[in-house]
């Protein structure tokens, strides 16, 4: 029986299309270049929104921001019953995981309290962090571990 391929989606913040070496960028990115060469690189994409959460929810759902009812980064959350590609992949038998910043919901308080929402979106394992500025005011598994080690006050 043929083994199913692994799926890996890398989503970065504020990265121009030509930032990778394989896309003509001047910065050397050998690991990302190799992933692009051995996998699929989407080179003709545009965002549906210049604002973070609506853009990311559009990617997750395939819907325009006005169809998700989320237009900004403040206080709005996607309906947990909304279809997402993560749920479709999980329902097809894959184990889905999230590591890092997603910004699929407003970041405040303790991100670990939003894990049930992320599970509803279709993610089995969740280890979400805030972005560089948000990590100063948002708790997560990472900031808790840093506090444990005395690296975070």
Image (cartoon, rainbow, N blue to C red):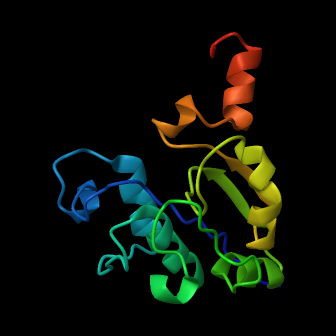
Q: Is residue 34 visible?
A: yes
When asked about the image quadrant of residue 15, the answer is bottom left
Residue drawn 77% across the image and 64% down it: 117
The residue lying furthest to the front in this view is 75
Q: How many marks?
A: 0
For the residue pair 4 and 90, the one nearer the viewer reads as: 90
* Figure check: 43 above or below 130: below
Which is nearer the eye, 142 or 23?
142
Q: Is residue 3 visible?
A: no
**Image height of 28 relative to 32, above or below:** above
Q: Quadrant of the N terminus?
A: bottom right
Image quadrant assignment for residue 16: bottom left
Measured as percent of width and height from the top left, residue 95 is found at 80, 67
Q: Quadrant of the C terminus?
A: top right
Q: Where 23 sits versus 94, above or below?
A: above
Frontmost residue, 53 versus 74: 74
Q: Position of residue 45 (x, y in %)?
A: 33, 79
Q: Residue at the location (70% across, 38% down)? A: 140
Q: Nearer the viewer, residue 24 or 128?
A: 128
Vertical order, 35 against 88 (above or below): above
Question: Residue 115: image x %, image y %?
Answer: 79, 55
109 left or right of 70 in image = right
Quadrant of the image occupied by residue 23? bottom left
Q: Residue at x 46, y 36 (%)?
A: 132
């Amino acid at each position: 029986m043929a083994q199913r391929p692994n799926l890996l989606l890398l989503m970065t913040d504020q990265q121009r299309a030509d930032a990778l070496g394989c896309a003509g960028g001047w910065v050397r990115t050998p690991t990302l270049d190799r992933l692009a060469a051995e996998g699929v690189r989407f080179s003709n994409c545009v965002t549906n929104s210049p604002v973070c959460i609506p853009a990311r929810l559009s990617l997750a759902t395939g819907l325009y921001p006005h169809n998700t009812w989320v237009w900004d980064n403040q206080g709005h959350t996607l309906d947990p019953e909304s279809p997402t590609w993560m749920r479709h992949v999980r329902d097809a038998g894959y184990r889905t995981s999230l590591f890092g910043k997603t910004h699929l919901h407003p970041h405040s308080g303790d991100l670990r309290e939003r894990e049930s929402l992320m599970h509803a979106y279709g993610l089995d394992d969740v280890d979400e962090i805030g972005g560089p500025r948000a990590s100063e005011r948002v708790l997560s598994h990472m900031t808790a571990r840093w506090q444990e080690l005395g690296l975070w006050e």
